[in-house]
Image (cartoon, grey):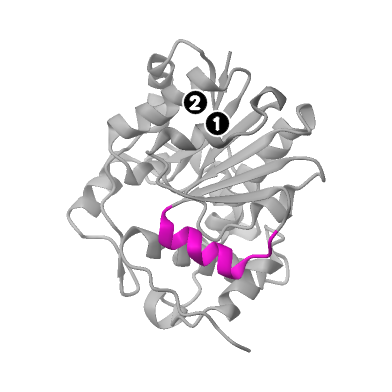
Amino acid sequence: MTTVKPELTGLPETLLWTLWNRACEAQHTDPVLDDPMAGELVRALDYPFEQRLGPPHPLFSQVQGLRSLTFDRAVRQYTDRYPEATVVALGEGLETGFWRVDNGRLRWLSVDLPEAAALRRELLPEHPRVRILARSATDLRWLDEIDTPERGVIVTAQALMMYLHPEEVRGIVAACAERLPGGAMVLDSMPRWITGLTREGRIRIGRLTIPPMYWSMAPGERRTLYEVHPRITEVRPLTMPRGRGTTGRFIQYQHLVPLFRSISPAVTSLRFA
């Protein structure tokens, strides 16, 4: 089988870590996320996953699977109401969400940096309702590429916003609230102490040093998102579903324990008037 050698460094390389964890979770006899394409993508890449990123980790793999499942459920909830909506996936990397949630009618716009978009085009199958746009999420011209906003739009930003500066995050959220009436957005955030360690270069996964993260938001700070734009009518926490075994129960209920809540990613849903 011919494989593709990804030429990724810095932030784009992190998409391989999330892919690796989803693929490892998908190989479990009782996976929390049904994602067979993740394993196919790993096999299609000429990349030393285990040597570079470390062996499969049961906690990381479940967290990644459950986080993707949390985003999937939010998208499905929205497209149940607006079945012909457009899903805009910012910084999608090699996620396979379209094939997990497609209802046969929705449209999908994947927005990512050029090197990540090129890899996505090369590895993932083409589909008439899927478009890939090689552009930074901070270049808000991607909003002009939404063909039918009147049919509904939900924007996802999984494992993206923390790498942006606070003013860039506010700019994206405000533009979505302004331009997408009746739309929704799902994003995740990291606690401040973790983002601080990344800026010091002190978080490594295997041989990969996590790039600097600039934006953080603790769960208790969610309400500050209302201040970004007056058309933000709902800011709601999304808790991860129950996972597998003791690890899965810990992931599901960690948000109830202040100590554990301060070290975990928080997923947030926004609605626009």
| Residue displayed at 26% across by 44% down | 193
Badge 2: residue crowd in 10 Å (few <14, some 14–19, many ≥20): many
Q: Give the amino acid at mark 1.
A: Met
Please give the residue where the numbered disc 2 appears in the rendered image. 176
What span is in magenta? Answer: 113-126
Picture coordinates of residue 48, whole percent (x, y): 43, 82
Tag shown at residue 219: none
- The reply to whether the C-beta atoms of the residues labelled 1 and 2 are less than 8 Å apart is yes
Picture coordinates of residue 235, whole percent (x, y): 52, 22
Locate the N terminus and report the quarter of the image it occupies.
Answer: bottom right
Provide the major secondary structure of the magenta segment: helix
Among the two numbered marks 1 and 2 on one chain, the one whose residue lies closer to the N terminus: 2
Locate the C terminus and report the quarter of the image it occupies.
Answer: top right
Which of discs 1 and 2 lies nearer the camera? The answer is: 2
Along the viewing direction, whichever of 166 and 122 lies nearer the viewer: 122
- Is label 2 in a helix, a strand or a loop? helix
Residue 164, visible in the rendered structure: yes
The verdict on residue 266 being magenta is no
Badge 1: residue crowd in 10 Å (few <14, some 14–19, many ≥20): many
Q: Is residue 23 left or right of residue 174?
A: right
Tag shown at residue 185: 1
- Is label 1 in a helix, a strand or a loop? strand
Distance in Å between CA atoms under marks 1 and 2: 8 Å
| Residue displayed at 66% across by 36% down | 86
Residue 74, visible in the rendered structure: no
Q: Using the image, determine if residue 130 lies above or below residue 161.
A: below
| Residue displayed at 42% across by 15% down | 229
